Amino acid sequence: MIKNDNQILVIFGASGDLTARKLIPAIYNLYKKDYLPEKYAIVGVGRTSYDDEEFRQKAVIENEHIKKEGDKSLEDFAKLIHYHSLDTSNKEDYKGLSDRLHSIDDDFGTNCNVIFYLSVPPSLYGVIPKHLAYAGLNEEKSGWTRLIIEKPFGYDLESAKELNKTLLEDYREDQIYRIDHYLGKETVQNLLVTRFSNSIFEPLWNRNYIHRVEITSAESVGVEKRGGYYDGSGALRDMVQNHLLQLIGLVAMEPPVKSDANSIRNEKLKVFQSLRPMTPEDVKNNVIRGQYTSSKIKGEEVKGYREEEGVDPESKTETFVALKFFIDNWRWSGVPFYIRSGKKLPTRVSEVVIHFKPNHHRLFSQSQKINSQNMLVLRIQPDEGVLLKFGMKVPGQGFDVKNVNMDFLYSDLTDAYVPDAYERLILDCMQGDATLYARGDSVEAAWEFIDPILKAWKEDSSIPIYGYPAGTWGPENVDDLIEGEHMMWRYPCKNLAEDGIFCEL
Ligand code: BG6
């Protein structure tokens, strides 16, 4: 086990939802597993005024997202936590924070190693690091300083470039950790292992054998309480620009020379640079956007997107997007890639589906059923696992062929503790490993692909936004995107091995 440096974690946005739901529970799990260094402190920062004890109660003792089990005491963990109140927009306040951190450093002996975690609205991503630098908190005199920045990183290409530029005025690239929680998911990391540790898949992983690649990320929830944020974002910015393009990067990249941060991130960058830019005509033909409308799900009335709290009643923000695109490089030339993501779909599921080409010569009378070719499904969530579909003889007369399933489920592992994405990512940052964080150049390259779509939607009002009843798989014409006869999206169920429009959800 790598020994972690003694350190302080400073969380901006300490009274926010992410801190309670993800960050504090993740750090508590690290604590229970003895991953925290001997000398460790957490400082919550926010505008609301609490004293240390009040914040400990709120953030830890009364936190309903913490699983209170094991022999490590929650009370002892809570003692690691402190609170400092500050107005994030007032740079003079940061001198007080600096004094506080120095005094905690003296008390705890954390060697001046600090991570600043920005769990705040995106408008503050440039402001807080600047003000930290004003108070000298970016300097690495005797320890190290790292910044973790939540998504969305930028609103479009221009704002992402601007933000990178602002950050790089005071910090080095290797101090900046741009978080994309999908990369912290165990099943996402397994994409690399499936590809590069099995000699049976990699030889097939190219245009000669793969017909198409499909990625679905469906959510059954709507925008819930985040209407205000989401209405200015939409599915393309919220899910595709970051999480789903990161998945594409891992599925499509060349084998890295080594498994270190730069080798892996260099290969992903090359994928993003090879994405074929979309013309306004491509956007019309190859991108479908939709918005959920009111409907009845299991007998209950469900609101449409435009009726949700914080959403403009005439909003044109997409809650669903599906796109077809190409990667113009040696490996993938001519292979279509499909991405589909949306809210208020029939179930929550994320998966990558590799569709293999059919045999060149059809020997047996395999009926031309929909999606009847070999298929490898890498299930990200839920029912995490890997599924291979292949043809088997139907017992009896003749040579009738039927597609059957061979699957592996994480839940079948005896010690299947699958850590939460945040646990893995925070631990990596503590150890200075940026492999699973997005690098500035690749974030910009991803925006470069997304920008023309946003621009076409903005400038061409004839591009429709289709309504789809909440609880359905998006606009009806979305299957038309898939190239080829007898081809459609896989309609996944909660259960990895089942699919089809009518499967149990
Ligand atoms: C977030 C998006 O980044 O990812 C949310 O802002 C979305 O809108 C969430 O619901 C999905 O994450 P997960 O881990 O539940 O798939």
Image (tube, helix red, strand yellow):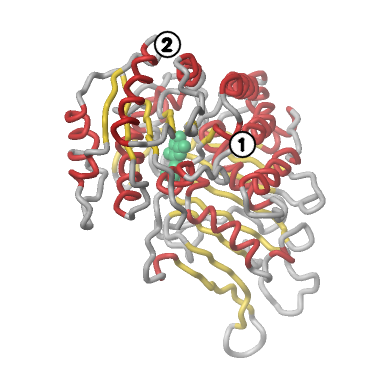
Question: Separation of disc 1 and disc 2 at Cα?
Answer: 27 Å
Q: Quadrant of the C terminus?
A: bottom left
The vertical placement of 154 against 389, above or below, is above
Circle 2 residues within 10 Å: few <14, some 14–19, many ≥20: some
Q: Mark 1 points at which residue?
A: 439
Q: Earlier in the sequence, mark 1 or mark 2?
A: 2
Q: Where is residue 207 in the image (x, y as percent from the top left)?
A: 77, 57
Q: In this view, does 53 lie to the left or right of 283?
A: left
The type of residue carrying mark 1 is Arg
* Nearest to the observer: residue 261 or residue 324: 261
Q: What element does badge 2 sit on? A: loop
Q: Is residue 140 left or right of residue 274?
A: left
Residue projecting furthest to the right: 330
Circle 1 residues within 10 Å: few <14, some 14–19, many ≥20: many
Residue at left 43%, top 23%? 121
Q: Position of residue 196 (x, y in %)?
A: 65, 62
Q: Name the residue under label 2.
A: 91
Residue at left 44%, top 16%? 135
Front tag of 1 and 2: 2
Residue at left 61%, top 36%? 439
